[in-house]
Amino acid sequence: MLGVLDVDAVRNAELHNDPYTFFLGSNFLKKSLVDPLRNSFPSITKPGFLTVDEVELRGPFKALIDELEGPELTAELSKKFGIDLSPYPRLTTIRKVSQLKDGGIHTDGKSKVMTLLLYMNDDWDPEGKGRLRVLYNGSSFEPFAVEVPPTMGTVFAFLRADHSWHGHLPFAGERRVVQVAWVRDAQELERKKKRNRTAQFFKSIFGR
């Protein structure tokens, strides 16, 4: 299956540079494939992000991951942000279950160059819980520049910076999102995968 993504969502999204460089788009998934993508989303019961190596990828959802990691999308994002992302390896992770402790304000680590988030929830409470915010500082959820609705086909991407603050108000429950991070080198990619596997191992033992 090809053509899961509608890259016009990237091309048409407005690029912002305040408080850091990001864009927010909608309808990133082909509407005719929303149902098959929803139905083939991995069956995940653990909280937190899992790498694509840790889950079963099948059907339309596997096609989605292939396109997210493919050179065509990287080329479009490179044009959008004015930076060549093609040399950087990609780390793709998937989340289905959020805990109240998730979503604290942070900037992402310096090993990341750019992060893209694709949300896959049918609807969402209009209140702020679980809705990612683009923030002006690392200490408060208000004021915020933009609030991202985690609804089906919403795409949010930003260049990592020392001031790329973001996070969301505490939320517990199902919150489907795919994250693709362009990282600085392959060794860093393997370190992140190893850390993620270790974290998931301890969560399976201690239930956190």
Image (cartoon, rainbow, N blue to C red):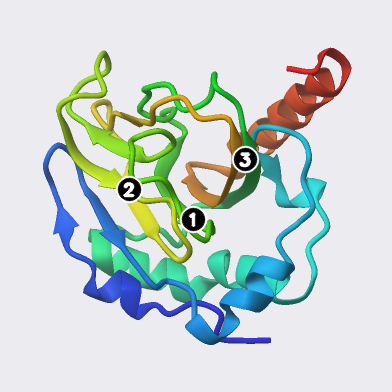
Query: From mark 3 to mark 2, how far is it between C-alphas?
Result: 27 Å
- Badge 2 crowding class, 10 Å Cα cut-off, few under 14, some 14 to 19, many 20 or more, is some
Viewer-closest of 173 and 81:
173
Q: SS at mark 3?
A: helix
Task: Identify the residue at the far left of this view.
Answer: 18
Viewer-closest of 43 and 15:
43
**Is 35 placed left or right of 54 in the picture?**
left
C-beta proximity under 8 Å, tags 2 and 1: yes
Q: Which residue is mark 1?
A: 119
At which x and y percent is residue 48? 65, 33
Of the two numbered discs 3 and 2 in the rendering, the one whose residue sits closer to the viewer: 2
Q: Amino acid at mark 1?
A: Tyr
- Badge 3 crowding class, 10 Å Cα cut-off, few under 14, some 14 to 19, many 20 or more, is many
Which circle marks residue 41 in the picture?
Answer: none
Of the image marks 1 and 3, the number of the one nearer the N terminus:
1
Q: Residue at x 39, y 73 (%)?
A: 27
Q: Which residue is mark 3?
A: 189
Q: Which residue is mark 2?
A: 148
**Is 86 placed left or right of 97 in the picture?**
left
Can you say whether 88 is above or below 18 in the image? below
C-beta proximity under 8 Å, tags 1 and 3: no
Can you say whether 150 is above or below 3 in the image? above
Q: Residue at x 63, y 65 (%)?
A: 65
At which x and y percent is residue 178? 56, 53
At which x and y percent is residue 82? 23, 61
Q: Residue at x 61, y 44 (%)?
A: 186
